[in-house]
Amino acid sequence: MGNRNLENQIAIVTGAGSGIGRELCLSLAKRGAKIMVTDINEKGIEETKKLIEAQNGYAETYKLDVVDSDMVKNVMDEIYKKHNRIDILISNAGISTPPSLATKMPEEHWDKLLKVHLYGTFNCVKACGEYMKANNYGRIVLSSSLGGVFGFAGNVNYAVAKTGMVGMTYTLAKELGPYGITVNAVQPGIIRTPMTKDALKAFEEGFIKETPVRRIGEVDDVSNAIAFFCMPESSFVTGVVMRIDGGYILQSSMDQIMMDVCSK
């Protein structure tokens, strides 16, 4: 089962019904955490639970719509009453909308995405934060994106949401640090998930060429980084936004030209 330095810690993962969220659950379970698997997708969380139990881990499932603040509070209250602690919160729930230029984006697409990513994260942090403060311990990790660094053409709503995650991370790190709670964020680059399946089918070769490590990211690349932030030993690491992109953001067309020149 690997290094079990999260033994018996209560870890809540949102958006855990598939993709990165599912891998996060498996990764934290291998380290001994008790996983509270949450998602609006009931079938997905049951599948995640089975996978955790297949590796001898502990899991509970909770249907959760992060946009519904009352539902979020009720679920977090239930978890705390049962376990008398919430140690880890991974705010991973997210959605995408069809690409659209900002001037043509339907208002409902703007509202829907921001509600899930920003309002949803705020709801979860608010519901868990007081419980973590009561125990003077907590690890919170928010899911941002490279889109929050240099924008995302055709997805202004996504770029705004992921930029907002960065500001939220910095502010929460200041507010919650005195209570032994760290708050950090990750900014995954191009990761192989169900959400990126179509893009990779069309552009994988180009993405690989533009990434210094010359491969597409895998979900365990993200889960391993998040696991670091969750460790008790990471108590002096807070307000950090970690890029997980294989160096993709560093590359430019000029770099590629010079690499080609130097290799001749």
Image: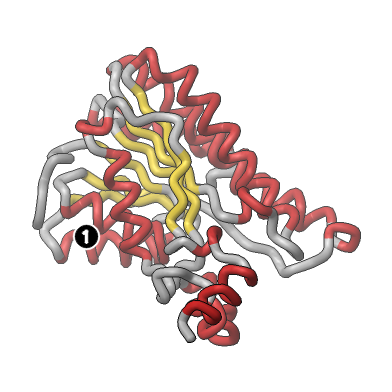
Coloring scheme of the render? secondary structure
Q: Quadrant of the N terminus?
A: bottom left
Q: Return the residue nearer the eye: 261 or 66.
A: 261
Q: Return the residue nearer the eye: 137 or 216.
A: 216
Q: Which residue type does callout 1 highlight?
A: Ile
Camera sees residue 200: no
Quarter of the image for residue 202 reads: bottom right
Give the residue at the far right of this rendering: 103
Q: Position of residue 234 (x, y in %)?
A: 26, 33
Give the residue pinned by disc 1.
52
Q: Residue at 11% x, 58% y: name it.
A: 56
Q: Residue at 48% x, 86% y: name it.
A: 264
Q: Position of residue 163 (x, y in %)?
A: 63, 43
Q: Residue at 80% x, 66% y: name it.
A: 100
Q: Residues within 10 Å of mark 1 (few under 14, many from 20)?
A: many
Would you say 12 lies left or right of 170 here? left
Q: Position of residue 23 (x, y in %)?
A: 32, 61
Q: Residue at 84% x, 54% y: name it.
A: 107
Quarter of the image for residue 99 reads: bottom right
Camera sees residue 101: yes
**Is residue 185 positioned above or below 176 on the image?**
below
**Is residue 91 positioned above or below 56 on the image?**
above
Q: Secondary structure at mark 1?
A: helix
**Is residue 223 positioned above or below 261 on the image?**
above
Q: Return the residue nearer the eye: 32 or 47.
A: 32
Quarter of the image for residue 255 reads: bottom right
Q: Position of residue 80 (x, y in %)?
A: 31, 29
**Number of callouts:** 1
**Is residue 16 positioned above or below 190 on the image?**
above
